[in-house]
């Protein structure tokens, strides 16, 4: 992973992203190689959540002319009428695997507090999440690193914002962490465009069908034993 460092400063100080007397610029380096993989990484994307591995967004995911923010919430628009109601958010969270209580709490909280009208997805900002905070692995974050991320981006005295931000990352961690307890870069990126929710819903449908078949087989077996 290429980041702005001492070499760049010595050759051309004007191009350095680090300042020796500002330790935070050394602790949280930014990438300087994005243009090798992403055309104009500094330009916001209206339709796709692009990164170095997916410069054209999620393969097979149709944006349907929606912005990245609209795609993020479209999964919860159960009747596709352009309006997401609390009961639709509840149903969506149930479909991706959350229990009834947590789904209800999230639905109520989201509809009382969220009012985002506009969001611009920036590849460079997304990639810098991992260059700044992904110290264990370059393409995944630990729970501690997620905490550091939320701390590093918080606004002073915005206590409600701190709570909401940490809560959102906690929900994503619960939903998409891997078996080793890491939250992958790909899971985070796909959360932005909503394709993660579609994937999780498909997994849950498969699991429910398997569970129903297992129950049916068990009931049939018990019936046969009783008949004997």
Image: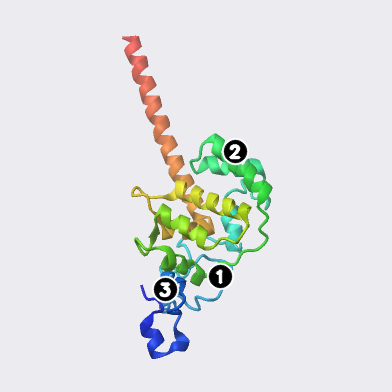
Work out how far the residue at label 2 is from the one at label 1, CA to CA, in angstroms.
32 Å
Of pointers 2 and 1, the one earlier in the residue sequence: 1
Mark 3 near mark 2, Cβ–Cβ under 8 Å? no
Label 1: state its secondary structure: loop
| Residue marked by disc 1 | 45
User: How many neighbours does mark 2 have within 10 angstroms: few (below 14), some (14-19), or many (20 or more)?
Assistant: some
Q: Earlier in the sequence, mark 3 or mark 1?
A: 3
Q: Give the percent coordinates (x, y) of residue 80.
A: 64, 50
User: Which secondary structure lies at badge 2?
Assistant: helix
Furthest-front residue in this view = 21
Which numbered disc, 3 or 2, marks the residue that appears first in the sequence? Answer: 3
Task: Specify the label residue 104 is tagged with.
Answer: 2
Mark in front: 2 vs 1: 2
Q: Tell me what residue is drawn at x 39 percent, y 79 percent.
A: 5
Asked whether the viewer can see residue 28, the reply is yes
Give the colouring mode of the picture: rainbow
Quadrant in which the N terminus appears: bottom left
Q: Is residue 30 visible?
A: no
Spatial distance from mark 3 to mark 1, Cα to Cα? 28 Å
Based on the displayed image, in which of its 4 quarters is residue 161 positioned? bottom right
Which residue in the protein does label 3 denote?
26
Mark 1 closeness class: few <14, some 14–19, many ≥20 residues within 10 Å: some
């Amino acid at each position: 992973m290429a980041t702005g460092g001492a070499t760049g400063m010595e050759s051309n100080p004007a191009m350095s992203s680090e300042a020796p007397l500002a330790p935070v610029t050394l602790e949280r380096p930014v990438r300087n190689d994005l243009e090798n993989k992403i055309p104009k990484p500094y330009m916001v994307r209206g339709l796709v959540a692009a990164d170095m591995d997916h410069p054209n967004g999620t393969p097979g995911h149709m944006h349907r002319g929606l912005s990245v923010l609209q795609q993020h919430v479209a999964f919860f628009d159960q009747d596709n009428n352009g309006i997401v109601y609390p009961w639709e958010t509840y149903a969506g969270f149930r479909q991706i695997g959350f229990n009834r209580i947590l789904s209800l709490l999230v639905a109520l909280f989201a509809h009382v507090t969220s009012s985002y009208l506009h969001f611009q997805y920036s590849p460079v900002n997304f990639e810098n999440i991992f260059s700044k905070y992904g110290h264990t692995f370059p393409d995944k974050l630990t729970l501690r690193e997620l905490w550091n991320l939320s701390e590093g981006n918080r606004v002073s005295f915005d206590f409600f914002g701190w709570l909401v931000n940490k809560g959102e990352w906690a929900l994503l961690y619960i939903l998409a962490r891997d078996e080793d307890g890491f939250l992958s870069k790909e899971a985070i990126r796909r959360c932005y465009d909503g394709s993660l929710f579609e994937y999780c819903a498909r997994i849950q449908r498969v699991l429910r069908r398997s569970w129903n078949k297992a129950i049916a087989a068990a009931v049939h077996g018990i019936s046969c034993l009783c008949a004997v």
